[in-house]
Image (spheres, rainbow, N blue to C red):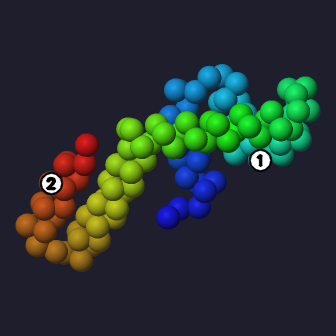
């Protein structure tokens, strides 16, 4: 399992277009720019709790999107198959093995 921050960053990359401008801004400031809840609250002139609640709700939304659309899961499957394919080519595995991996890669929808 990947670290929570890394996972949220991946989910944000895949699903940010589904978020509101405010949600996107809070997530960028918190996860990408590494601002604290207090710093974000100060910038938007709201309470730290309001920022926290918005970020937590947005994280839950991103997880719901992933449950329904599985873009991150498919990305990870493709990455794993690409790594296996690279290893197979470097090890001069049989063309059948390489083709089998390519077919698996094509099958990840």
Q: Which residue is drawn at 29% across and 60% down?
A: 81
Q: Nearer the viewer, residue 81 or 92?
A: 81
- State the residue lying farthest toward the bottom: 91
Question: Residue 63, percent across and down?
Answer: 51, 43
Lateral position of residue 30 relative to residue 90, left or right: right
Q: Quadrant of residue 96?
A: bottom left
Question: Residue 13, percent across and down?
Answer: 53, 39
Q: Is residue 4 above or below residue 31?
A: below
Q: Earlier in the sequence, mark 2 or mark 1?
A: 1
In three-dimensional space, the C-alpha distance between marks 2 and 1, rounded to whole angstroms, equals 40 Å
Q: What element carries label 2?
A: helix
* Disc 1 packing (10 Å; few <14; some 14–19; many ≥20): few
Lateral position of residue 85 relative to residue 40, left or right: left
- State the residue lying farthest toward the left: 96
Q: Which mark identifies residue 103? A: 2
Q: In which quarter of the image is the C terminus?
A: top left
Q: Which of 5 and 100 is in front in this view?
A: 5
Q: Quadrant of residue 44?
A: top right
Lateral position of residue 63 relative to residue 5, left or right: left
Q: Which mark identifies residue 34? A: 1
Question: Residue 30, percent across and down?
Answer: 74, 42
Q: Which mark identifies residue 26? A: none
Lateral position of residue 66 relative to residue 5, left or right: left
Q: Which of 47 and 76 is in front in this view?
A: 47
Question: Residue 23, percent across and down?
Answer: 67, 29
Q: Is residue 83 visible?
A: yes
């Amino acid at each position: 399992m990947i670290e929570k921050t890394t996972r949220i960053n991946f989910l944000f990359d895949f699903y940010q277009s589904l978020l509101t401008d405010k949600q996107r801004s809070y997530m960028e400031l918190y996860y990408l720019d590494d601002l604290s809840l207090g710093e974000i609250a100060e910038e938007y002139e709201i309470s730290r709790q309001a920022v926290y609640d918005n970020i937590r709700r947005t994280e839950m939304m991103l997880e719901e999107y992933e449950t329904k659309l599985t873009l991150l899961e498919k990305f990870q499957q493709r990455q794993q198959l690409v790594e296996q394919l690279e290893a197979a080519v470097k090890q001069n595995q049989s063309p059948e093995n390489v083709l089998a991996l390519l077919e698996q890669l094509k099958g990840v929808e």
